[in-house]
Image (cartoon, helix red, strand yellow):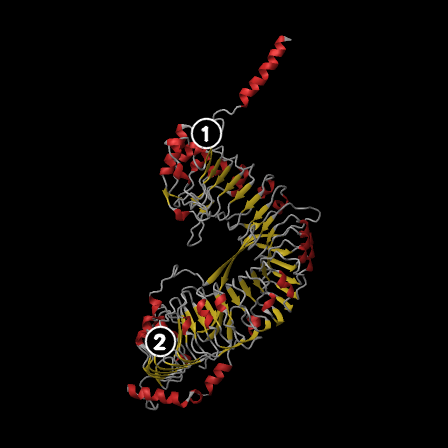
């Protein structure tokens, strides 16, 4: 009994002693030393960590002096509480720049279980094979860190891994991905990672099929294989993995498959992204069984048929993108059940009919994009309920009737594109203060614009092309200093040249074609309107007079562009978010330009492209010799004016010129042989002038046809039938500068209408009868009179 009492007394004391926390062991010296040597192998560069807004220099606190001498207290270092060994190292977004080689002291940390080096810059070094010595790793993240070359086979030996992320090691300027599978096959990797839960190989150059072995990974929760060069048939069994929540295989264009038809099975998948793959077939009614879905992206695939009404069962959906397919029929009314939907993107399909789904319940919508379909009827007033709307795209449909901008009560609307419909009415946008992109082109809007655009300071692009707007351009546009593109072509604006736009620092496109603009365009040092960033200006088919205004564009020589020789485009980058999911758009600015004798609708405008079109006005005088200073010019059109004098030989300095159109003027003299230096010239038209002498013969000039030179009675030589040396019965031409000037003045005083008679009936026929090349919106180009078909009479 005594012994029992004594034991009962001792036990609580023993428990009390062991309940006090023991002192955590200090970091091992060899591991402290390894970490400090690892630190010394890098340069700290703040610019290399791009993806964490609160990135910091974690290793700055690493030191063996003072209170921080214990490496277990260092930022980013995690130690085992019992042994003191370093088991975790998180240096993500730590501004590290340098290489990791096979001798790195990192690989002395053999007790590591978690290693995160994401969002640094490891100077295009290869992932060392010594990573295989870290055999206890369960988590490895080397994403966004500029690793290069082959992924070593030793990665597959990390059999304890539950999470592996090698995503997105690429060059920022070119977008080229660096990592590749060569020594290591995807089958070998997956076959050895039986415990894997999260696998992200996005952007790795794998170029293989998706092995069936993936369907055996019962622990897999997320699989990211986007933009990997995957091809062949996607194993349908992956959809049925019991723990899979995220499946992302987008941007594998040669990867084929179809939406699984599991009639009596309920999926637990939350995110499916098959965007820009070769998946095809119709969407089955059983897609309603995927009730856990939060995000679904089938954009840019080959799905056809109708959208099944069972889509209304996916009531957890926040993100739905079915754009760029061939889906047809009505939009099912059941989409109105998706009350949590923030992103609805159905553009570029063959959907038809009126709005059959109610917008009343979709109050969470941030993005609504239905452009590029055949939807019809009036635009519903239910739009006024969408107070969170950020992006509204209804372009290229068959909507009709009065469009009252007041139904859009969203003060935060960023993007509005209702172009290419049958909408009419007036434009009042004074309260849309957040607007960046406004495109109402190719409709039937009319009236004058209110002078309130100064309220929309963030405006970057405005397109009013192909309507019936009239009156003056609002001077308040000059306050929109972010503007990059202004297109008011094909309207009835009656105003002088808007020289007051010349101070806009970002303006790249200024398109005034086919209006009633008039008067001289004065250029003097006092005006100080330089258009510092302008790339393309189109003044054609107006009533401008006086001399050619070219001085403002002489800065094009000094204008430097990043990626001058890469295919970059003038565009706005759109970003929208509901706090959980994000959507990115590159909105390409478009234009219509008469180039190489044809009206061309451009889907995209190359950043480096430079063009001047001042055709079909009343410009007089000579072409100034300093035209040769515009050395980066690609297209030049002065046709249908009253220009006189010689063709400046300095045009031969425009070595990037692809199209030169001087048709229907009063130009004199010979064609300078210096123009044969234009080796990129594809279109050359000097017909219907008063040129004489022999046609040069070298390089591109040997490719031009008779029509490029006809109507010049003094010209001779190939390709004309008139050979040089034949008798010339042409009328004498004015030769002295005074005679030339008097000739031009007399033409101008007689008036434009009389001059047109002198040009002959061929011009009128050429303006009225022609054909159009359009790379976009061909179906609606023919239905609107705002876009004329033009060719030049040859």
Compare residues 266 and 488 and report the one nearer the observer: 488
Question: Label 2: how many residues lie within 10 Å, few (<14), some (14-19) or many (20+)?
Answer: some
Q: Mark 1 points at which residue?
A: 85
Q: Quadrant of the C terminus?
A: bottom left
Q: In which quarter of the image is the N terminus?
A: top right
Which quadrant of the figure has residue 356? bottom right
For discs 2 and 1, the disc positioned in front in the rendered view: 2
Tell me the element at label 2. Answer: loop
| In-front residue for pair 424/285 | 424
Tag 2–tag 1 contact (CB < 8 Å):
no
Point 49% across, 28% down: residue? 81
Q: Where is residue 342 in the image (x, y as percent from the top left)?
A: 60, 55
Is the residue marked by circle 1 packed among few (<14), some (14-19), or many (20+) residues within 10 Å?
Answer: many
Name the one closer to the observer, 760 or 452: 452
Say whether disc 2 or disc 1 marks the residue closer to the N-terminus. 1
> Can residue 726 be seen?
no
Q: Quadrant of residue 747?
A: bottom left
The relative height of residue 270 versus residue 770 in the rendered view (above or below) is above
Is 688 situated above or below 463? below
Please name whichever residue, 195 or 539, is drawn nearer the observer in this view of the structure: 539
Q: Residue 523 carries which label?
A: 2
Please provide percent x and percent y for residue 137: 49, 35
Judge whether residue 22 can be spotted in this image: yes
- Percent x, y for residue 371? 58, 64
Spatial CA distance of label 2 from label 1 is: 75 Å
The residue shown at (63%, 59%) is 304
């Amino acid at each position: 009994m005594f012994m029992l009492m004594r034991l009962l007394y001792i036990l609580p004391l023993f428990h009390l002693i062991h309940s006090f926390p023991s002192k955590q062991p200090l970091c091992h010296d060899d591991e402290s030393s390894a970490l400090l040597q690892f630190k010394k192998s890098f340069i700290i560069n703040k610019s290399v960590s791009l993806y964490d807004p609160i990135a910091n220099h974690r290793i700055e606190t690493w030191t063996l002096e003072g209170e921080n001498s214990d490496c277990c207290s260092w930022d980013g270092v995690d130690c085992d509480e019992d042994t003191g060994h370093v088991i975790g190292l998180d240096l993500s977004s730590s501004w590290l720049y340098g290489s990791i080689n096979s001798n790195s002291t990192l690989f002395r940390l053999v007790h590591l279980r978690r290693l995160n080096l994401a969002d640094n810059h490891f100077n295009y070094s290869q992932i060392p094979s010594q990573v295989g010595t870290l055999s206890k790793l369960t988590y490895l993240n080397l994403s966004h860190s500029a690793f290069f070359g082959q992924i070593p086979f030793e990665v597959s030996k990390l059999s304890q891994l539950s999470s592996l992320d090698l995503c997105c090691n690429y060059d920022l300027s070119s977008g080229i991905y660096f990592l590749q599978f060569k020594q290591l096959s995807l089958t070998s990797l997956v076959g050895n990672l039986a415990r894997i839960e999260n696998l992200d190989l996005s952007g790795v150059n794998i170029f293989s099929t998706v092995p069936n072995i993936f369907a055996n990974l019962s622990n897999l929760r997320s699989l990211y294989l986007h933009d990997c060069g995957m091809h062949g048939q996607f194993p349908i069994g992956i959809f049925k993995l019991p723990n899979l929540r995220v499946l992302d295989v987008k941007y594998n264009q040669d990867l084929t498959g179809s939406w699984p038809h599991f009639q009596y099975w309920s999926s637990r998948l939350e995110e499916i992204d098959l965007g820009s793959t070769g998946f095809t077939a119709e969407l089955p009614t059983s897609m309603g069984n995927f009730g856990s879905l939060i995000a679904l992206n089938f954009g840019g695939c080959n799905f056809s048929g109708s959208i099944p009404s069972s889509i209304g069962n996916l009531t957890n959906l926040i993100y739905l993108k079915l754009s760029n397919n061939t889906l047809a029929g009505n939009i099912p009314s059941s989409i109105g059940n998706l009350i949590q939907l923030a992103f609805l993107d159905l553009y570029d399909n063959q959907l038809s009919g009126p709005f059959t789904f109610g917008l009343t319940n979709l109050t969470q919508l941030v993005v609504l994009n239905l452009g590029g379909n055949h939807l019809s009827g009036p635009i519903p007033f239910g739009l006024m309920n969408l107070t969170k709307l950020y992006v509204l795209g209804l372009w290229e449909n068959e909507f009709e009737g009065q469009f009252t901008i007041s139904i859009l009560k969203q003060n935060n609307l960023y993007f509005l594109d209702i172009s290419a419909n049958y909408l009419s009415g007036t434009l009042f946008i004074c309260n849309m203060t957040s607007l960046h992109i406004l495109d109402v082109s190719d409709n039937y809007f009319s009236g004058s614009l209110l002078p309130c655009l100064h309220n929309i300071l963030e405006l970057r692009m405005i397109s009013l092309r192909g309507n019936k707007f009239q009156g003056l351009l609002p001077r308040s546009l000059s306050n929109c200093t972010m503007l990059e593109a202004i297109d008011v072509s094909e309207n009835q604006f009656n105003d002088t040249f808007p020289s007051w736009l010349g101070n806009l620092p970002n303006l790249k496109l200024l398109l005034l074609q086919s209006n009633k603009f008039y008067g001289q365009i004065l250029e003097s040092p006092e005006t100080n309107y330089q258009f510092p960033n302008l790339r393309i200006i189109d003044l054609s088919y107006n009533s401008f007079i006086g001399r050619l205004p070219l001085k403002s564009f002489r800065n094009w020589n000094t204008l430097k562009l990043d990626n001058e020789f890469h295919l970059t485009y003038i565009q706005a980058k759109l970003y929208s978010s509901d706090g959980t999911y994000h959507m990115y758009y590159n909105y390409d600015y478009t234009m219509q330009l008469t180039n190489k004798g044809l009206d061309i609708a451009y889907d995209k405008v190359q950043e480096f492209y430079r063009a001047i079109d001042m055709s079909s006005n009343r410009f007089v005088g000579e072409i100034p010799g300093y035209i040769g200073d515009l050395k980066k010019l690609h297209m030049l059109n002065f046709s249908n004016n009253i220009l006189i004098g010689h063709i400046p030989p300095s045009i031969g300095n425009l070595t990037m010129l692809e199209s030169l159109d001087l048709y229907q003027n009063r130009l004199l003299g010979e064609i300078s042989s210096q123009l044969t230096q234009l080796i990129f010239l594809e279109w050359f038209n000097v017909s219907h002038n008063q040129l004489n002498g022999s046609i040069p013969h070298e390089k591109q000039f040997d490719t031009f046809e008779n029509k490029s030179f006809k109507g010049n009675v003094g010209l001779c030589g190939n390709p004309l039938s008139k050979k040089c040396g034949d008798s010339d019965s042409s009328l004498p031409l004015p030769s002295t500068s005074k005679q030339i000037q008097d000739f031009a003045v007399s033409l101008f005083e007689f008036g434009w209408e009389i001059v047109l008679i002198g040009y002959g009936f061929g011009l009128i026929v050429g303006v009225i009868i022609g054909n159009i090349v359009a790379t976009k919106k061909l179906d609606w180009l023919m239905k609107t009179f705002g876009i004329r078909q033009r060719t030049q009479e040859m």
